[in-house]
Image: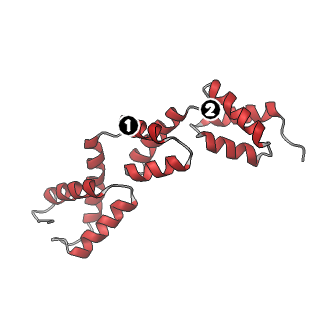
Amino acid sequence: MTPMTFEKALSKAAHMCVQSEKAPQDVYDKLISWGMAPQLAEKIICQLKEEKFIDEDRFAHAFVHDKFEYEHWGKQKISYHLRGKGISESKIENAIDDVISDEDYVSSLVDLLKSKLRNVSLPLEQNDCARLYRFSMQRGFDSRTFSMALKIAGDSSDDSDFE
């Protein structure tokens, strides 16, 4: 198999970036899998950034929006995955602050907890609270948000006390 030319790799990478937002690390990994030398892959990444096919801020905003709205992930899980894609901490914080309001954040966890509470008899026992806590931590929510959301979810379901 003959190696891919620079122009063909650039064209394929640009086409890939047009279809959906990509992190620079994802594009780099794809270029390497196509057999590109690391130096050429870096050069392609730089050119794609210059031509605005790749934009880390735009990617971070899209990632935060999609994972929060459709996957119902918390801020911690979103941050962890963005760091894994090589996005800087400042860009992650900016994207999270721009996309997720405090009210929407708590409301999202309240909705998740309400769906879980349908399967639990009230009042909650200690192991039920622990299970809900673990669930919210796996989704990437912090303990402060969990406490607020559990209280709200408890107040809005049957007149039971969650404390």
Q: For residue 12, what is the image quadrant?
A: top right
In the image, farthest residue toward the right = 2
Q: Position of residue 153 (x, y in %)?
A: 20, 57
Query: Quick one: SS at disc 2?
Result: helix
Position of residue 64 relative to residue 52, above or below, is below
Residue drawn at x 90%, y 44% is 2
Amino acid at the residue labelled 1: Val
- Residue most extreme to the top: 51
- Per the model, the C-alpha gap separating discs 2 and 1 is 22 Å
Residue 42: give x, y in percent of width and height. Answer: 71, 37
Residue type at mark 2: give it. Val
Question: For the residue labelled by badge 1, is the local secondary structure a helix, a strand or a loop?
Answer: helix
Residue at 36% from the left image edge and 37% from the top image edge: 97
Compared with 2, 156 (above or below) is: below
Does residue 72 appear in the picture of this structure? no
Tell me the residue that label 1 is attached to: 99
Residue drawn 39% across and 45% down? 69
Circle number at residue 81: none
Q: Nearer the viewer, residue 89 or 67?
A: 89
Q: Name the residue under label 2.
A: 18
> Is 106 located above or below residue 52 in the figure?
below
Is 117 left, or right, of 1 in this rendering?
Answer: left
For residue 15, say whether it is visible: yes
Establish if 12 lies above or below 73.
Answer: above
